[in-house]
Image: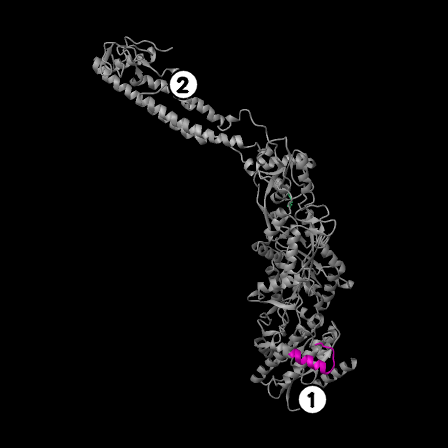
Amino acid sequence: MENMDFIFKICISFVAIWNLHLSYGQTEHFRVAALFEPEYEGMILAFQNAVTKVNMHSEVGPGKNIIYDLKTIAPHDSFVANKEVCREMRAPGGIAAVFGPVSEISRAHVQSLCNAFEIPHIQAVWDSRVPREYFSISVYPDHEVLGRSFADLIKHWEWKSFTVIYEDGESLVRLQKLLETARGEEYKMTIRMLEVHQNTFTSMLKELKEKQEYRIVIDCHVSKIRQILDEADSLNMLSAYYHFHFTSLDLSQLDLEDFKFKGANITSMRLIDPSNPEVMNIMAEWGLMETNIGRSPLLGMRAIGTETALMYDAVHMYARALAGLANAHHISTETLNCNKREVWNQGNSLLNYMKAIEYDGLSGKIRFDDGKRKDFRLGIISLTHHGLIEIGHWTPKIGINITVTVAQQVQDEREMLRNMTLRVVTIYDPPYVVNLTEPNEHGRMHEGFIIDLLDELSRILGFNYTIYEESKREYGSKVEATGKWNGMIGDLIERDRVNKADIAAAGLTITYARAKVVDFTMPFLNLGITIIYRKPMKSPPDLFSFLLPLSPDVWIYMIAAYLCVSFMLFVIARFTPYEWENPHPCNEESEEVENQFTILNSLWFTIGSLMQQGSDVAPKASSTRFVASIWYLFTLILVSSYTANLAAFLTKSRMVGPITNAEDLSLQTDIKYGTLASGSTRDFFKNSNMSTYKRMNAYMNANGDRVLVKGNTEGFEKVKSENYAFLAESTSIDYQVQRNCDLMQVGDLLDSKGYGLAGPKDSPWIALLSKEIVHLQQKQVISKFYTKWWVEKSGAVCEDDTDKKKNTNALGVANVGGVFVVLAGGTIFALLVAILEFLWKVSRNARVDKQTFWSEMTEELRFIFVKCKSTRNTGGDQGTKTVENNGVTFNAIPTVPNDRNHKEVFD
Ligand code: GLU
């Protein structure tokens, strides 16, 4: 191999000799100096190759060639660098430019020297010196603009918390823009230095892992990247949760095959687009050249190095500028002495030609703005299972432009998941996950609703999974004292420290607080908190259950109505003249008149009709008949309603328990109640602002372990064995109620929420799982699983007592109030009719008796209400005659009351 290398160098030397030879021929030549450190062999070869090509294609012009004197110098040896440049300037004919060196100190010295002698200095490496010497020009992208691209990426990814690792002072300058951007309060950025002196990065990586830093920006030389990734891999840090962004533009040069399927996001940017035809040609050419001479690939590697390509571009760019100047003027270089204050007169013109040039090179369009290369395109590359692919690009004008489609990204993620074995944390709680003591018919140690769901998802997405139970059997709540999360949520958050759970799959409730620290899929079951309590015993029949169909209010109103109507009937009958009649119909001469509606008769009449039995008292006057009709209507409706409701009351068994909702529970102390000690139900009560739930929370706090349970199963057992109501989620309660016929759900749901699968924040799998869950829901696969585990697997068939549980309500005033109103209205109307009848008769009698209306009325009222019974003047003409008596005249039909002969007929 060494021999081959030797032959290759001889070839290169031949090219150089040929170049020198040209200098002694007719051809006009331009001599340049090239200084390189040996480690930049790629740049050296690119430089030589580029000069050869320039000369071969007469890029400077016909008969015009570039010749060079190439020197390799030790890195950072500024003294030798200076000496070499001075020697070159002193040589006959002097030099028309200096290329290189690369190392920072030597470069700075050469720049100053070139500046002093007005010789263009051309470089192709990153240089942050501000301001740069005037005569120095670099094809490397301007460091400030490049820095902006890193900051833009962080903004695009919306990273609010990340770690920046830098290698040296130069790195910090490169990252300056990024550091400035992340200075805001919303960012949490940690900056660390790469421990290059230790030969290993393990301790630094371990620390990052400990601190759960998942987003890492690393600025280091490309040669260190592979080692960093290898060591990160050995620490399991190349999982899908990590994102490593390298600021080096040469990541494409590395062999990253080993990391393709690890899952970690490995990104970077590149200046050289390998799909550029120019780049492809050069790579093929160099590759061929290297193969022909049997040299290990340096130029024709998997990707062309940025600085190598830039040196190639720099030579071409220089040749074009030279051609431009040569076209305009005759170019003559001069011998210059470093010890004298001399300058090359045409140096400035040549520099200006270079600054004005536009050239399409391997690194894209080369254009200078104020001597700096500010307009360039960077491809954004990401490691996928297909290798490094360009997912977008960045330009100073447009910024980030991601070109890879969402569908492509999803497809990539799906393929990534296909090779994964996910670690699932759960809690054994039937019917979600049941841990079997021996394998079931499918040889599995677990079964349940969640297992079916996971199996279906793994079948569709092609992943495998292993399952373990959370050590304390807790779902996950924030522990107030430490501010940390426990349970499955804690396992997800601390996945790198503990069991490394990728997914939490159980009856895990999606809550706002949890969604802030982990990612949830779409819900696969909907539920709410409710109460489970044992069914009440059937109560013995009530002796006075006949009273139940009507509420006590209605009973009281009915008695009041009865008394009022009876009294009104009595009054109306007194008013109306048509209720006064001869008690001795055979004795038409009798002057005695009598009113059948005495108080007792009125009471008897109304009670008779209320009881639907009737009575021997029958109203005769329109007013009394009207009252009677209204009363009949009232009794009809009330009695029918009573009868209808009585039937329901007599058939219902008293299944209604002592509590019907959470409010009832909170207002009593006989029945103990509680929730799971740690879980979303407990958190619901802790965080609620509603007085009922606050009261319940205070009760649970006060009673602690006596009412709070460790698991749902313990809670349900407690309900069965004690006077205890358990507040749990409706799905779990449904499952119990279907299997334990003496348990029942009490009241409605207190809230509404869902169960979801959870993954660590930014988990790449959650979106995929979520999509499939929605799909399974649409295909009703999830409801099929629900039926299987809730209904089909239930052995017990409980008597359906939903009808019995229905509370038959006594009829209240709200139900039958209307009929009371009608009754009151009717009675008042009847009273008015009676009064009209009375007034009409009074006015008629007053005319007949020739009395005043008022005295006639006074007489008559006195008779009606004071004397109460009358006898009539026997000489009167019954029916048609008017009987006059002390001025009170009644047109007796059939008997006319006569004041004088009134006789009490009351008992
Ligand atoms: N599903 C609940 C959770 O995720 C546990 C049960 C409960 O709190 O009632 O925390």
Q: Which mark is residue 497?
A: none
- Classed neighbour count for the residue bearing mark 2: other residues with Cα under 10 Å, few (<14), some (14–19), many (≥20): some
Residue 772 drawn above or below residue 33: above
- Image coordinates of residue 326 in percent, x first then y, are 59, 84
Q: Quadrant location of ligand 1?
A: top right
Q: Nearer the viewer, mark 1 or mark 2?
A: 2
Q: Quadrant of the C terminus?
A: top left
Residue 676 drawn above or below residue 455: above
Q: Nearer the viewer, residue 834 or 126?
A: 834
Residue 540 drawn above or below residue 117: above
Is 293 inside the magenta-drawn segment?
yes
Residue 793 visible, this angle: yes
Residue 342 visible, this angle: no
Q: CB under 8 Å between callouts 1 and 2?
A: no
Q: Which residues are magenta?
A: 282-298
- Image coordinates of residue 875 in percent, x first then y, are 23, 9
- Image coordinates of residue 483 in percent, x first then y, are 68, 45
Pointer 1 residue: 21
Left or right side of 38 for 738 = left
Left or right side of 429 for 526 = left
- On the image, which quarter does residue 400 sit in? bottom right
Farthest-out residue, front: 586
Is 769 inside the magenta-drawn segment?
no
Q: Earlier in the sequence, mark 1 or mark 2?
A: 1
Residue type beneath disc 2? Trp
Pointer 2 residue: 604
